[in-house]
Image (cartoon, grey):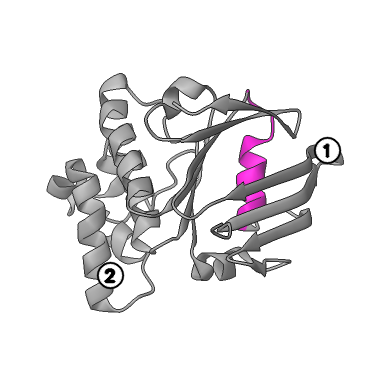
Amino acid sequence: MTAPLLAIEGLAVDLAGRPALRDVVLAVAPGEAVGFIGPNGAGKSTLLKAVMGLVPARGTIRFEGAELGQLAPERRAALGIGYAPEGRRVFRGLTVAENLDVAGAAGAAERARRTEAALNLFPALRPHLNRRAWQLSGGQQQMLAIARALVAGPKLLLLDEPSLGLAPIVLEELTPALARIAAGGTALLIAEQNAARLRGVAGRVVEISRGRLSALVPGS
């Protein structure tokens, strides 16, 4: 059996003195796409932030067999964990090309290869490379946020509500791009509010309720 890329055991997080996650156990295989569904406040975003090291957490998180412990987010990113947070947090004053370039810590040739691969996934960005990020539409900004995370070359990509506020026509472009990312070998953890938005992407969907993984919803 292939060892999991990500293994979480007994994960617990408190926020503002209240439990946000409790007793989370999860294993994600290399290249697997796992979706999380649940209403606002269920714990979806907190789980992603805990994996990224953005909130204090108890329990065990292992990545490629190594325990992450108290590693800072930048150390986790260097190990191969990418993160595209909710809200399309691009560098609004930089151009599209600059947003992509600052994401990669590899050499120039490898950054160029990764950038080209990201643009092939999101061709709508290619005509706008010299435009400032604030000039893009909401859908284009979301594509840029994901493309920027990909240029770092992650083995695991965390996506928080990637479809939030996007028009149906934009979702028609985004969904197959996410499926291609997973097919290319990058594991995905995707937080969404309903399972329909994960159709065609996630092979496994987990429901979160009050900070606990409460059920498995059949993959779509």
Furthest residue toward front: 1
Residue 171, given in percent of the width and then of the height, sits at 32, 27
Q: Helix, strand or loop at disc 1?
A: strand
Residue 36, given in percent of the width and then of the height, sits at 57, 33
Amino acid under disc 2 = Arg
Number of residues whose C-alpha sits closer than 10 Å to that of mark 1, classed few (under 14), some (14–19) or many (20 or more): few
Q: Are marks 2 and 1 in contact (CB under 8 Å)?
A: no
Q: Which residues are magenta?
A: 39-52
Q: Helix, strand or loop at disc 2?
A: helix
Which of the 4 quarters of the picture holds residue 52? Answer: bottom right
Q: Please check the rendered image and state whether residue 49 is part of the magenta-colored stretch, yes or no.
A: yes
Number of residues whose C-alpha sits closer than 10 Å to that of mark 2, classed few (under 14), some (14–19) or many (20 or more): many
Q: Residue at x 60, y 56 (%)?
A: 6
Residue 111: mark: 2
Q: Name the residue that disc number 1 marks.
A: 19
Q: Quadrant of the C terminus?
A: top left
Residue 125, given in percent of the width and then of the height, sits at 20, 45
Furthest residue toward right: 17
Sequence order check, earlier mark of 2 and 1: 1
Vertical placement of residue 104 versus 150, above or below = below
Amino acid under disc 1 = Pro
Residue 50, given in percent of the width and then of the height, sits at 67, 51
Which of the 4 quarters of the picture holds residue 197? Answer: top left
